[in-house]
Image (tube, grey):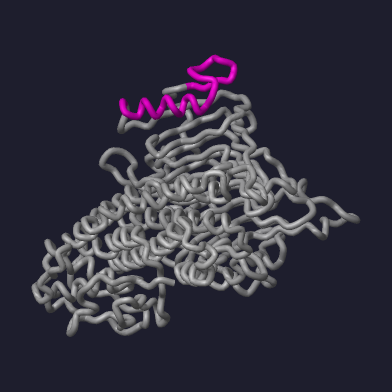
Amino acid sequence: MASWDRLGGVREIEGEDRAPQESGGGGGGGARGSGERKRGCSAAKWFLVSVGVVFVVVFLVAIPVAVTRARQSGRSKQNLQSAPLTVGAAANQTCKGSDDFQLCLNTLLYYSDGNSLNLSATADLKTLASFPIKVLTASSSKAKEVREDINQLVMSARGTVWEVAANECNASLYDSLPLLLQVANATKKEEYDIARAGLSALRTQTADCAEALFAALNLSVEVSSSADSFNATFDSVEWLFNGTAGATLYNSTVTFAFHLSNALNVITNVRDRIASGQVVVAGSRRRLMRRRLLAQADVDRSVTPDFTVDPSGGGNFKKIQQAVNAAVTMRAEKPDDRIVIKIKAGLYREKVFVPKELYMLTIIGEGPTRTKIQWGDYTNPNYTTGLKTSNTSTFAVEALGFLGIDFAIENDAGWSQKVQMAVASRASLRTLELSPGKLGSGVAAFVNCHFLGQQDTLYAHSGWQYYYRCLINGTVDYVFGNAAAVFQSCSLNSLRTNGTNTVTAQARTSKDEDTGFVFRHCDVDQRTTNQSVYLGQVHPYRQVYLGRPWKPYARVAYMFCYLGGINPEGWMRWTLVGKGADNHETAEFLEYRNTGPGSATEQRVSWSRVMSDDEAPDYTVEKFIKGKKWLPSLGIDSDIWA
């Protein structure tokens, strides 16, 4: 593998607050932990690396310059508040933890003509504020090269096995730069939770692209999207790409993932310092423990619609997508107001897509048993349908502030040897712009909706999401993705009467991501109608598991739930050999105060655990998906979720 061609200049500032020693030599890879990390030298990679550095440095504008970051080795924090930082020390502290420490230093300290800043000068806020500007300036010429990498793969993939992968990467990464700039803006405004949600979404998108590229190779190995596994997998299979455009893009994607992880880590430290000293008041835990009559609270359905959809022709449109398209046009006229679409009872045989430009949209049906949106796209083993998982969704939302009420979404592709993934609903974070000049990351909330399918029914892809009093049916991994999502008072039903059912497949790719699934007051596999009887007993070959770890840091919690026919072990490994076989070792699978015949934890797998009382407050709607910041603006009052 080609090694990094370092920019000339300082490797580490002597006499300053030093980071761990990097591996030497102009062509050597920067150290990651104690191992040497090698990477390719594609031009596009430099752009992705440099943009990633923005988030390593920009947070310093918003905090005292004398605060230092404790090393993961556990050494005691240095107290530098009594002495001003030099430019060199500030750069060293900013670049600590960077996957490429040398590149970070060179970007911050050197001008394009090779001259450097005065390393001994005092680092004032103006100097620190210039760091992200320098990185963006150095990266601007590389942005075109990244686009060229993607475009080259799209063009070269025509009629080949790379076509699906190229389209997936194009769809996943085309708007990564605008989203990165929004993350930087959120960080400057000290909106750290929003910034972290954006970075987590970008990590998910890089994993989507990497997996698509591996699928094109038709390997029996699945790429893991943790930073270590990303790199190890790439090192071991680089020769399979054989210098194709796919290799260049994969290499860039892996590098991008490294730096997004670093940015998440830095912003986590900043957020945690700001939050330190806050304590949970005595009454809050009692409120958490109390099982409330949540069904008494509800949302307001009496709003006047901007458009009405009626399949019989009695409204403004006969198709839902027609109304959505009209709402996009109306958005220019109503930049700050919520747009409402009411859909009359009926079966709507169509795919619906809400683009990121259509923020603050509400769609209200006439009940999930009367108003249904239905389509049947799916993937198959050899991808001959030309579709990836995300493209199969019957209903997809990529805008912020979406609210869906009283309708059903179904993927009716069914279950057979030729049908694999078939998504009913997907919600993804593609932007942090809630409205002009306002940032957010609350993607979608669904109230009294039904999600019907088989494998991969509900794709909670990224961003903050909330599901209240919803029904979710499926068989394999039927709630999956890497959103930060809370499911409250929902019913989850496993449809296989003979075979294995897995409720969740969560895809958290880094320990620093604020993502995961939390089920609160839900009924899981309560319906006895799903359980076939054999010799007077529930069928012995029907198994239901609470979930399995799609990615290495998967996180799922069940709290105050009724658990029905759950296998006593509770959780499954992703697989026994290859393909993420060790994901369970770093996953977090939690249970707390559940009831029902499947709630006993004595026989659970050793890598799941019971949540402690001290941890429980972190898994509320308010804390886990920052509900207070966005749900009231959708009309979902705290009486529902508090």
Magenta-drawn segment:
308-333
The image position of residue 17, as x and y in percent, is 21, 81
In the figure, residue 112 lies in which quadrant?
bottom left
The image position of residue 293, as x and y in percent, is 55, 47
The N terminus - image quarter: bottom left
Q: Is residue 185 left or right of residue 572?
A: left
On screen, residue 117 above or below 140: below
Q: Is residue 30 left or right of residue 300?
A: left
Question: Residue drawn at (45%, 33%), measured in percent from left and top?
Answer: 362
From the viewer's side, name the closer residue of 62 and 284: 62
Question: Residue drawn at (61%, 62%), measured in percent from left and top?
Answer: 219
Question: Residue drawn at (48%, 24%), measured in percent from left and top?
Answer: 322
Q: Is residue 431 left or right of residue 92?
A: right
Farthest residue to the right: give it.
535
In the figure, residue 436 lies in which quadrant?
top left
Q: Is residue 609 visible?
A: no
